Image (spheres, rainbow, N blue to C red):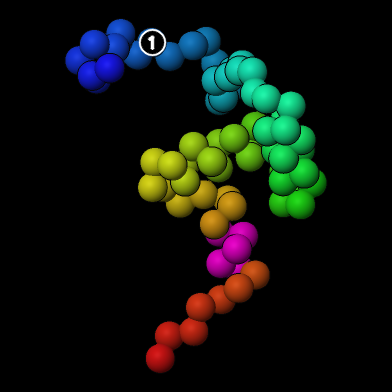
Amino acid sequence: MRVSDLEEYRPPKLLGKKAPLNCLVLPDQHQAAWKATQRYNMSFGEYVGALIDRAEGRPNKLDGMQQKAFPIEER
C-alpha cells in the first residue's frame, strides 16, 4: 500500500492533551508489554508511546532510561 492510497489523517477527539488508542494484541505480546511496564515503571500508554517514538527515530523514555543506566564513555 502506498502512502498516496491512505486516507487523510483525522485526529481523534482528545482526552485532555492525549488521543485515545485502542488495539488488540496477542496474549504473549500483552504479557510482554505488561512485564515491560513493570520493569520501566510506566503505564501501558507511556510504553506504547515510547515504542512509537522509537520507531519514528525520536527521543523516547525507553532509550532515555537505558542511557541513564548505562552511560557510554567517550574516549
Image quarter of the N terminus? top left
Q: Is residue 42 left or right of residue 47?
A: right
Whether residue 51 appears in magenta in the rendering, the answer is no
Q: Is residue 15 visible?
A: no
Q: Nearer the viewer, residue 23 or 11?
A: 23
| Residues drawn in magenta | 64-68
Q: Which residue is mark 1?
A: 10
Q: Nearer the viewer, residue 57 or 30?
A: 30
Q: Is residue 50 left or right of residue 53?
A: right
Q: Is residue 71 visible?
A: yes
**Number of callouts:** 1
Q: Position of residue 59 (x, y in %)?
A: 45, 51
- Residue at image location 68% in from the left, 25% down from the top: 26
Q: Nearer the viewer, residue 29 or 61?
A: 29
- Residue at image location 41% in from the left, 47% down from the top: 58
Q: Position of residue 35 (x, y in %)?
A: 77, 44
